[in-house]
Amino acid sequence: MTLRIGIIGTGAIGTDHARRINRVLSGAEVTAVTDVNRDNAEACVAGVAPGAQILGSAEEVIAASDAVLVCSWGAAHEAQVLAAIAAGKPCFCEKPLATEAYGARRIVEAEEAMGRRLVQVGFMRRYDRGYVALKETVRTRLGPPLMIHAAHRNPTVPGRYRTPMAIHDTLIHEIDVLRWLLDDEYVSAQVIFPRATRHTHAGLRDPQIVLLETAKGVRIDVEIFVNCRYGYDIQCEVVGEEGTARLPEPTAIPTRLGAVFGQPILMDWKDRFIDSYDVELQDFLKAAAQGTAAGPSAWDGYVAAITADVCAQAQERPGAILPVTLPARPALYA
Amino acid sequence: MTLRIGIIGTGAIGTDHARRINRVLSGAEVTAVTDVNRDNAEACVAGVAPGAQILGSAEEVIAASDAVLVCSWGAAHEAQVLAAIAAGKPCFCEKPLATEAYGARRIVEAEEAMGRRLVQVGFMRRYDRGYVALKETVRTRLGPPLMIHAAHRNPTVPGRYRTPMAIHDTLIHEIDVLRWLLDDEYVSAQVIFPRATRHTHAGLRDPQIVLLETAKGVRIDVEIFVNCRYGYDIQCEVVGEEGTARLPEPTAIPTRLGAVFGQPILMDWKDRFIDSYDVELQDFLKAAAQGTAAGPSAWDGYVAAITADVCAQAQERPGAILPVTLPARPALYA
Amino acid sequence: MTLRIGIIGTGAIGTDHARRINRVLSGAEVTAVTDVNRDNAEACVAGVAPGAQILGSAEEVIAASDAVLVCSWGAAHEAQVLAAIAAGKPCFCEKPLATEAYGARRIVEAEEAMGRRLVQVGFMRRYDRGYVALKETVRTRLGPPLMIHAAHRNPTVPGRYRTPMAIHDTLIHEIDVLRWLLDDEYVSAQVIFPRATRHTHAGLRDPQIVLLETAKGVRIDVEIFVNCRYGYDIQCEVVGEEGTARLPEPTAIPTRLGAVFGQPILMDWKDRFIDSYDVELQDFLKAAAQGTAAGPSAWDGYVAAITADVCAQAQERPGAILPVTLPARPALYA
Amino acid sequence: MTLRIGIIGTGAIGTDHARRINRVLSGAEVTAVTDVNRDNAEACVAGVAPGAQILGSAEEVIAASDAVLVCSWGAAHEAQVLAAIAAGKPCFCEKPLATEAYGARRIVEAEEAMGRRLVQVGFMRRYDRGYVALKETVRTRLGPPLMIHAAHRNPTVPGRYRTPMAIHDTLIHEIDVLRWLLDDEYVSAQVIFPRATRHTHAGLRDPQIVLLETAKGVRIDVEIFVNCRYGYDIQCEVVGEEGTARLPEPTAIPTRLGAVFGQPILMDWKDRFIDSYDVELQDFLKAAAQGTAAGPSAWDGYVAAITADVCAQAQERPGAILPVTLPARPALYA
């Protein structure tokens, strides 16, 4: 009854998922891996997946497994996910689902053609305890939401991080989680550039503010500040007709030391949603055992991609309000 | 050496200032009052200003006093302040300095012609301990400010409160205090209307978001939500190059009761900055004893009026970014 | 390689552990269960342990399993743990290890005779993220600890809960976790009875304050208040030479609603340390796979029992300071 | 109608009160001062009391004033207060009212003999906004109080500060404010000495814990830690039948900087209750204008002295529970 899991791409995240499946979660075992760099695959097997065979291609891994994890580099995702769908195998795909919106569209169409969900996209924030509790609070106590004030701050980014990555790599998480939180869709986007921090570099306008509007009229402002210095900090305040609710701070020890009453802020993004990786993968394993997928869908990945593309265009025309136009939602994702 | 203070307009705020001067603050006494409604004046004298004579006009009060407080209704401010300037008497004027920006301009010109400051405008937030500490923290620890996220929430407003009043009566405080906080000037304004709360009424779009841009490139978003239900709540977060700082919550008793760990939120705006009224008036008395004025100037009142006018125009054209154009700052206000 | 787990006692906690092992954790499966009430055992198997056989006795379960969980009622623990030790099987025992200190002593002696650790006691707080982080903060940032101020509050208890249960059922957790936190041993105990709450009942003095002293001189005050009404609330503040650190509040959504800025407090103790059950059992499974046990030991259970006995005697003599005398720590538990 | 105030003792606190009366508060003026060191008196007059005459003795100051402030060194208080009472002049006396309890008793008797209150003792915490709000919350929302957990922490003390000063100079504030908060009297005291901090010095056991019991059965634990390093920090949590309430933290700016989410802690005790000095003196002036005194009374000073003496004896017998025995409360202080 143990589910055989194949992992395509055994870099940091793929290996970490292998560890998670073999040592933390219940009901599955990593039985096949592949990586363009065979050293990576060997290290993964030696470290956390002793029972897995190393195969030469994604296709072989798909064939040898009950379900697969696509953890390769972004440009390879689309073809690998399509191959998994074609094989009828549940497939967990780390973001992005595809590097272009039309790639995501092809995945949606393939899945629709199969007639059942097979793809879960790695938007782990939906599994974060804080967001889950926030959504429940919004639903039960706040009245209709009217506004969201959010911030996505990172202490620093490397020199190769350019302005559009603030959308595609960073805002992408808010794009997904906020429409899930609100159960709503975006209809327009605007980007504003404040004075730049001296801690940024050529090629990156930092910080940015993205203003989103939803179909129900909710207005969202998201500050993206990836050289904020002080920490990795995700803020989200929902304002409803009856009151407000915030995402909780990560658990930390309050101290009184050296004239400061404070608590540590995380510096590494990897620690911020670390618990939610366990939950999202367990959710994947549970659905995969039934031959299907749950959680963030290919459609969600596609919508995120479309929205991100509009935001990236809005970066080019600061201040302009650009429409976000979505195709009709297929019945499979109703 | 006790300063003789005249009060023009003895409604709620004028009477409260009389009490403050006679019973709380040092160095001054209310010696003359006037009100269009003589009953008001008599009640003020009977209640908190036993040593004051009731006079028939603002001019008589100005003539009989060392300094005056203009607490009449807004439409009368301009003429009364001009009269005080003409008499060379220090004059504390509750907001608005004038109902139109060009009225404020006339006051600025009159004061300039006199060659010394005589007017203090009642922007009391500059005297609030929280804002003062926030300004100091921003100056010393945050690096150059890049963004401000602010909110001005009121539990409810009466039916006569219309959309533009969200600017002229409500945002006006942020307009003044944020440029003081930043030591900067506004260059553009944009207004966004989220989905309206069902708790608003005809004639009032509520909530609103005002986006301001400063000369130094700081971007400010201010949520104005005057039927927010849950409390009177003023929020201000400054994001600088090195970190963030927030306006503190008002002092309140944290309790653990009935499954809630919480503290009360004020419901009445009059309680929120109550301490700062004492401090602003003491500052006025101190300068008035020297025959001049300090604190928020006629120029500040004029700039606030110009900015408010642009914001009100921006309400008419949601989404449009309108320029804020200020005249050159006169040397008197350098 | 999957570890065969037997569960002795399939009441609420036993069944929950069965669910945990079969559905949440990795590396083990429940293969045998027993309960004095066969209906319980059948319900457990039907609900969460479909692959388990129902056996007639603890001994049979021990014989049929690689490791066992003792989740029966307290009076049966000692004999069942001794049987597991005799069989050389790793054994996780819910608290209490034994109903009397000398019962715990017999277990310690049996384990010593075996020459290796086989018993883990269910003191789950040691696995709570908050306590783990607090211990690390104390160790690295606070300097030598000098005092602990703690509170253990429960909204209400049933009528059968009597004064000594405040020690044996409630304080027992602080007794274990605080000596682990401090890496220290108790040397004296004193009990103080404040004015009783009207919400208590005959047979229960509530609240109580227990004062503990450690070998290193740390002074601990623990408020035990089991009819506190407002919530299940565990507080712990450590004061060291350089500053203080507190146990964090459980994650909760901060809201602004109805004139209150607050967050919910848990009402049910079962929710408070819910995550730590997963971690403690995973730790048990990991050691059991090696044929041994880790975590809170039989010695820890014995020391807790001795300390609890002294505290219960101190309840009989309010204000008196009674010595806590421990036998020498056997080498096995060094 | 301006009250003539005399100040006996123009050291730091006397001069600060002179400034307060002349520049901040309403209705009074410092007209006479004296000091054993004439330079002090001259500096005070030159700095903040230009209209005051320097006199040669406390008696002359009393004779020349409508009311007096006794700010001399502690050993002189008793005689000066008695002289003010004999002259029928309202008298504000900084703590201690007298260096020995029987000195305070003589003052109580003298005041009783006069038949009206003339003395206010400088227990300023009763005027602190936080304590006032805490008392109101306790009275209206908490049900009967059962316990108080308190702490009085100071970053460091000089070498001349000895063990008993932790009672007479430090705990004395809790002794007064907690019985006021509870409207209750102490009946016993116990002192416990935790492990000493290495930051203390010969002659000072630090920290200490004082356990107080009241007539209504409330149990109070007060940590006194005067070399706590990290700040001046006053904590007070009241636990009642329905829930808990805490003294608020002093207003401070929350920042996110350098991986810490924190706010500054005061380092100087003089800043902690700085606002309450204004309020207590205004209260004194108001009553003095009527020829009497309000606020903390000579009786309160006497009770604090008796209680402090018992606590100091309890320091000599660590662990022993000593009774606090108060004389009957005279009708004047009912």
Image: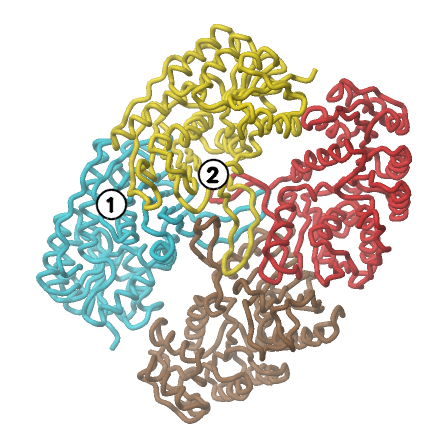
Chain colours: A red, B brown, C yellow, D cyan
The residue where tag 1 is placed is D214
Is residue B322 among the parts visible in the rendering? Answer: yes
Residue A130 is situated, as x and y percent measured from the top left of the image, at: 62, 45
Answer above or below: position of B226 versus A83: below
Residue C246's disc number: 2
In this view, the mark in front (2 or 1)? 1
Tell me, yes or no, if residue B304 can be seen here. no
Helix, strand or loop at mark 2: strand
C-alpha span from label 2 to label 1 = 28 Å
Disc 1: host chain: D
Q: Of the numbered discs in the image, which one, if any, rests on residue D178?
A: none
User: Vertically, is B308 above or below B272?
Assistant: below
Element under label 1? strand
Could you say where residue A125 lies in the image, as x and y percent from the top left?
Answer: 70, 43
Q: In the visual, does D199 lie left or right of B311?
A: left
Q: Position of residue A185 (x, y in %)?
A: 77, 56
Q: Name the residue type under label 2.
A: Arg
Query: What residue is rendered at 23% in x and 57% in y?
Result: D121
The image shows a total of numbered marks equal to 2
Q: Amino acid at mark 1?
A: Thr
As drawn, D199 above or below A168:
above
